[in-house]
Image (cartoon, rainbow, N blue to C red):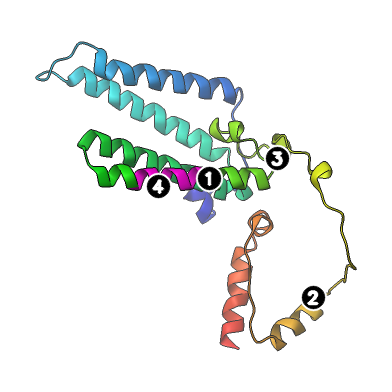
Amino acid sequence: CLKLHGTIASKPRVIPYRFIFTLLLFVAMVLFGTLSFTAGQDWNDRVLGLTFIIIVAILASVYGVIAVMAIGGGDMPVSISFLNALSGMSTSAAGFMLSNEALVVSGAFICCSGIILTLVMCKNMNRSISKVLLGGFGDGGGGGSINIEAKSEKVVGTVKEATAWDVFELLTNARKVIIVPGYGMAVAKAQHACAELACKLRAK
């Protein structure tokens, strides 16, 4: 929220040995999560199990901060899509625990749609899904295994250069204007300028 608000700079901040630290966090969360159910506590004495669950929550919060701080401004949509998939997974797990079929089905739909969207966005942004899952946001565009030059298509047609005045005339004379947001707008941080432009066009 602080990055989206602009309080913290959107520049990626990566801690040293992030991969090893992330792996240790996951191992610790799995270990304490297992101990919360198998540590020998009974139904009337669940203090030890609740302590392990609190430790898991703290470790998960630490991982969340580290992962979010490593996200660059242009990578924010990928992270939001992946977190949306995780929310669906947790909803489905809660449905299994409560024996609620509606929660299981709705959580599965949210999880599947979020994962599909994450994979599509990673492919189009030349990102590796393994780096995304391990908090590899903000490393720059060279993290994926896709060769852009090899997959680039040959440009056909004539490139017409347009000045700011030409764009102004086109916008003022157009009956309808469609603004399609994309990765370039996120990197250039042009969403506020586009919103202001849309307000002025509506006022016209």
- Residue contact at pointers 3 and 1, CB within 8 angstroms: no
Please tell me whether residue 187 is drawn above or below residue 130 in the rendered image: below
Mark 3 vs mark 1, CA separation in Å: 22 Å
Please tell me whether residue 29 is drawn above or below residue 40 in the rendered image: below
Camera-nearest label, 3 or 1? 1
Residue under pointer 1: 116
Percent coordinates x, y for residue 141 in the rendering = 71, 41
Q: Residue furthest right?
A: 158
Percent coordinates x, y for residue 164 in the rendering = 79, 75
Mark 3 vs mark 4, CA separation in Å: 31 Å
Residue under pointer 3: 140
Q: Nearer the viewer, residue 92 or 191?
A: 92
| Residue found at x 83% / y 42% | 150
Question: Which amino acid is tagged 4?
Answer: Phe
Answer few, some or many: residues within 10 Å of disc 2's Cα (few below 14, many 20 plus, some between 14 and 19). Answer: few
Mark before the other along the chain sequence, 3 or 1: 1
Instruction: Verify whether residue 112 appears in magenta.
Output: yes
Q: Is residue 201 left or right of residue 98?
A: right
Q: Nearer the viewer, residue 5 or 29?
A: 29
Question: Which amino acid is tagged 3?
Answer: Gly
Question: Which amino acid is tagged 1?
Answer: Ile
Mark 2 vs mark 3, CA separation in Å: 30 Å
Residue 79, visible in the rendered structure: no
Mark before the other along the chain sequence, 2 or 3: 3
Percent coordinates x, y for residue 95 in the rendering = 26, 39
